[in-house]
Image: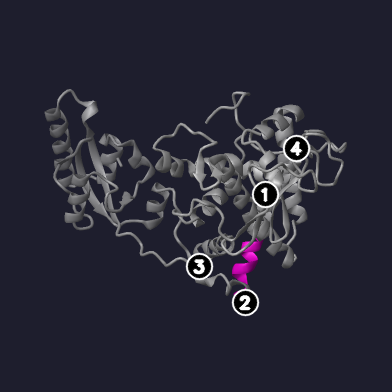
């Protein structure tokens, strides 16, 4: 009624990746659709054509760099962590953003910007060297958008530090247990290979992102529980949306696919209608003779809004009084004998995979929007080493 596979032929489906997608979407929505220069409130300290600088921003030559900022050659620091992407590629409010921070968002940044590319060039065959805005290639624009995604995390993590919000022992145990489970499932080497294919540095990098998720969750709860803290985010609270106008109905369906002719389906529906009008229990008739298996999951009836059901079903339901039963109604599915019921908003949300918009959920959205909007007022400094981060890395 109502991607690509990687070289291993499989992907890690980790819940934490959903966080990345959400953050990527939120940051993308914050960008003005007409702003394709990606220069607003940002300080460029590099030129895409200029030689790179082998200082704290990374070593563009590919040779080993023994500084604390990391070694972009892919070597290990001896502790088991892959520090090959720990070189700094940008800064937000003076906070370092490393290549590791940016790598996870590169793929998502490109996906977000593909439509902009299509609107500009009229096709989806991507030329990363095409000039996306004056002096900025599409490749460079993707990297800068990925920096913005990483900058979002840096902003809320810094805010959490200011409020002395830290990972709890219980949360650390959950992270350790999840990492241990993944190692047991895939093996240490294959796990890190799969993680790198998804943009992670290694298992420790994944643990950092899990920790960041817990910190964000705690930060939001602290802010919405403190009126003084929430005051700075109150302006972003979305307007309360009116509840949809819902209808409720249960029905006995004679499905066309179960009959040789349409006439047989109609006769079947009329027989059941007459039995219902003679006083037989409608729910019993649904269970014994109805041909909509979905009704078994909604014994009290479907709850639906305008456009959720086929027009004939909706219109007939609207014309009935609660408890009244219709004559057989034809739709593209078959013939329906409909009884109108009281709608249930919780069931409507369940059908639409949504949650009711409570005041708390709207306050949480406001905090997200508030941190997102901060990106429009901070200085993002792109360092020369950003040029050395390949999109496929």
Q: Residue furthest front?
A: 50
Q: Is residue 224 magenta?
A: yes
Q: In the picture, which quadrant includes the N terminus?
A: top left
In this rendering, the label closer to the viewer, 3 or 1: 1
The residue at which mark 2 appears reads as 228
Give the Cα separation between the discs numbered 2 and 3. Answer: 15 Å
Quarter of the view holding residue 165 = bottom right
Q: Position of residue 320 (x, y in %)?
A: 18, 55
Q: Nearer the viewer, mark 1 or mark 2?
A: 1
Tell me which segment is drawn in magenta: 218-227
Q: Nearer the viewer, mark 1 or mark 4?
A: 1
Name the residue located 19 percent from the left edge and 53 percent from the top edge. 324
Q: Which residue is mark 3?
A: 236
Q: Cα distance, mark 3 to mark 1?
A: 34 Å
In this view, the mark in front (2 or 3): 3
Q: Secondary structure at mark 2?
A: helix
Which residue was labeled with disc 4?
A: 180
Query: Relative to 163, does residue 11 appear above or below in the rendering?
Result: above
Work out whether mark 1 precedes mark 2 in sequence or the reverse, and give the earlier one: 1
How far, Cα to Cα, is label 1 from label 4?
Answer: 41 Å
């Amino acid at each position: 009624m109502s991607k690509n596979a990687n070289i291993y032929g499989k992907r890690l489906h980790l819940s934490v990746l959903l966080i990345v997608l959400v953050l990527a979407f939120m940051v993308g929505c914050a960008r003005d659709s007409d702003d394709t220069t990606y220069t607003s409130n940002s300080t460029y300290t590099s030129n895409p054509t200029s030689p790179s600088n082998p200082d704290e921003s990374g070593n563009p030559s590919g040779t080993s760099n023994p500084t604390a900022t990391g070694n972009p050659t892919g070597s290990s620091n001896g502790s088991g962590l892959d520090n090959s992407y720990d070189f700094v590629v940008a800064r937000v409010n003076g906070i370092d953003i490393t290549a590791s921070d940016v790598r996870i968002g590169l793929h998502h940044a490109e996906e977000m910007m593909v439509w902009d590319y299509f609107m500009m060039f009229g096709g989806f065959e991507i030329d990363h060297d095409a000039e996306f805005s004056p002096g900025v290639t599409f490749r460079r624009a993707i990297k800068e958008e990925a920096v913005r995604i990483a900058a979002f995390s840096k902003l809320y993590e810094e805010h959490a530090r200011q409020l002395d919000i830290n990972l709890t022992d219980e949360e650390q145990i959950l992270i350790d247990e999840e990492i241990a489970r993944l190692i047991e499932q895939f093996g240490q080497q294959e796990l890190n290979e799969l993680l790198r294919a998804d943009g992670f540095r290694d298992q420790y990098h994944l643990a950092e992102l899990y920790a960041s998720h817990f910190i964000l969750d705690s930060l939001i709860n602290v802010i919405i529980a403190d009126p003084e803290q929430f005051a700075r985010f109150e302006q972003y609270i979305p307007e309360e949306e009116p509840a949809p106008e819902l209808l409720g109905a249960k029905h006995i369906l004679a499905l066309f696919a179960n009959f040789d002719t349409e006439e047989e389906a109609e006769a079947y529906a009329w027989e059941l209608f007459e039995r219902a009008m003679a006083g037989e229990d409608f729910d019993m008739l649904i269970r014994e003779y109805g041909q909509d298996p979905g009704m078994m999951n909604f014994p009290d009836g479907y709850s639906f809004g305008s456009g959720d059901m086929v027009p004939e079903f909706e219109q007939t339901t609207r014309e009935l009084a609660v408890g009244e039963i219709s004559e057989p109604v034809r739709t593209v599915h078959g013939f329906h004998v409909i009884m109108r019921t009281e709608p249930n908003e919780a069931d409507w949300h369940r059908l639409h995979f949504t949650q009711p918009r409570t005041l708390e959920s709207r306050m949480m959205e406001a905090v997200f929007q508030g941190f997102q909007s901060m990106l429009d007022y901070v200085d993002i400094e792109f360092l020369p080493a950003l040029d050395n981060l390949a999109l496929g890395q």
